[in-house]
Image (cartoon, grey):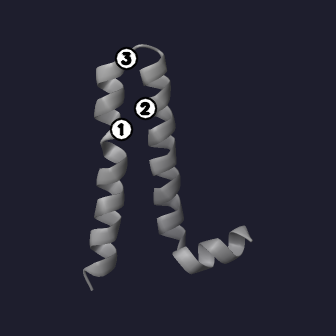
């Protein structure tokens, strides 16, 4: 199942999705620990990376 997903999406895209997921987790941990401004700053990275991935995908 995971191997099929990696073949469909691509290995690099899977790595980038894991990076985005880890960014979201780090942002939540920071927010819950009281560092709200840092959490908001880091939370903006996830959609930026996803948007950049879409740009590169459809640039062809």
Q: Where is residue 8 in the image (x, y as percent from the top left)?
A: 58, 79
Q: Which mark is residue 27?
A: 2
* Residue extending farthest bottom: 60
- Which circle marks residue 43 in the picture? 1
Identify the residue at image location x=35%, y=66%. 53
Looking at the image, do the residues carrying marks 2 and 1 touch, with CB atoms under 8 Å apart? yes
User: What is the secondary structure assignment of the residue under circle 2?
Assistant: helix
Q: How far apart are marks 2 and 1 (CA)?
A: 6 Å
Q: Mark 3 points at which residue?
A: 35
For the point 29% across and 73% down, the residue is 56
Q: Residue 8, labelled with which disc?
A: none
Q: How crowded is mark 3: few (under 14 residues within 10 Å), some or many (20 or more)?
A: few
- Disc 3 and disc 2 in contact, CB within 8 angstroms: no
The answer to which of marks 3 and 1 sits earlier in the sequence is: 3
Residue placed most toward the observer, 34 or 8: 34
Q: Residue at x 29, y 80 (%)?
A: 58
Tell me which label, 2 or 1, sits earlier in the chain. 2
Q: Residue 60: x and y, percent?
A: 27, 86
- Quadrant (top left, top right, bottom left, bottom right) of the N terminus: bottom right
Residue 39 at x, y percent in the picture: 36, 27
Q: Is residue 36 left or right of residue 10?
A: left
Query: Of the residues under marks 3 and 2, which one precedes in the sequence?
Result: 2
Q: Is mark 1 on a helix, strand or loop?
A: helix
Residue 33 left/right relative to 44:
right
Q: How far apart are marks 3 and 1 (CA)?
A: 12 Å
């Amino acid at each position: 199942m995971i191997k099929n997903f990696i073949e469909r999406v691509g290995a690099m895209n899977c790595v980038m999705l894991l990076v985005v997921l880890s960014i979201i987790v780090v942002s939540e941990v920071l927010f819950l620990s009281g560092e709200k401004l840092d959490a908001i700053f880091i939370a903006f990275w996830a959609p930026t990376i996803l948007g950049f991935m879409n740009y590169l995908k459809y640039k062809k």
